[in-house]
Image: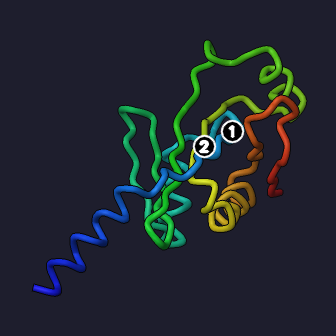
Amino acid sequence: MKQKKIQKKTKKIKQNEAPSARAEWLYMADAGVSLRCLYELLRKEEWNAELWEEADVLEIMLPGAGAIDMEYLEEEQWEEALFAQIRKHQTEKVYTVTFAEEDYGQVQEVMKYLTEQAGGLFCRDTEDFFPQIRGR
């Protein structure tokens, strides 16, 4: 009987929790960097990731149940400021990157690893595209 009461209280608390804020970032990459390429790099280091090629989506699971979602951003959706950043950094592809703000520390590790292995840069989706995380 006590076990059922504890489970009900736990469920109720979880249902009342506010959803965590989502961070919106961008990954600017070279032409040859696909989600498949990123997925293979992550698998090599035993990161837990899932790739949905038909949808151009990569999900990277984080310890503690968080996740990073990466999705290809079609060129038709780029704004002029983004075009300018792409030219400035000599990249050709853009992926949107979303995750829970509270997971930023763990996400930063993944971003650093990917930029060190595949190049490009991650930047916050803001007017000035800062902060930025770069690799090589």
Q: Position of residue 81 (x, y in %)?
A: 83, 20
Q: Position of residue 116 (x, y in %)?
A: 75, 60
Position of residue 13 in the picture relative to residue 92 (left or right): left
Circle 1 residue:
26
Q: What element carries label 2?
A: strand
- Identify whether 32 is placed above or below 6: above
Q: Position of residue 24 (x, y in %)?
A: 65, 40
**Neighbourhood count class around disc 1 (C-alpha, 10 Å): few under 14, some 14–19, many 20 upward:** many
Which amino acid type corresponds to the residue marked 2 in the rendered image? Val
Q: Which residue is drawn at 49% across and 72% down?
A: 63
Looking at the image, do the residues carrying marks 1 and 2 touch, with CB atoms under 8 Å apart? yes
Q: Which residue is drawn at 28% across and 66% down?
A: 11
Q: Residue at x 78, y 34 (%)?
A: 126
Q: Is mark 1 on a helix, strand or loop?
A: strand
Q: Who comes first in sequence, dot 1 or dot 2? A: 1
- Identify whether 5 is placed above or below 90: below
Foreground residue, 44 or 4?
Answer: 4
Q: Where is residue 78 in the image (x, y as percent from the top left)?
A: 68, 18
The quadrant of the rendering that contains the N terminus is bottom left
Position of residue 59 in the picture relative to residue 128 (left or right): left
Q: For residue 97, what is the image quadrant?
A: top right
Q: For residue 73, what is the image quadrant?
A: top right
Q: In the rendering, which numbered label is found on residue 97?
A: 2
- Identify whether 67 is placed above or below 98: below
* C-alpha distance separating marks 1 and 2: 5 Å
Q: For residue 87, what is the image quadrant?
A: top right
Q: Which residue is drawn at 83% across and 57% down?
A: 136
Which amino acid type corresponds to the residue marked 1 in the rendered image? Leu
How many numbered discs sit on the rendered protein? Answer: 2
Position of residue 108 in the picture relative to residue 15 (left or right): right
Residue placed furthest toward the left: 1
Foreground residue, 41 or 63?
Answer: 63
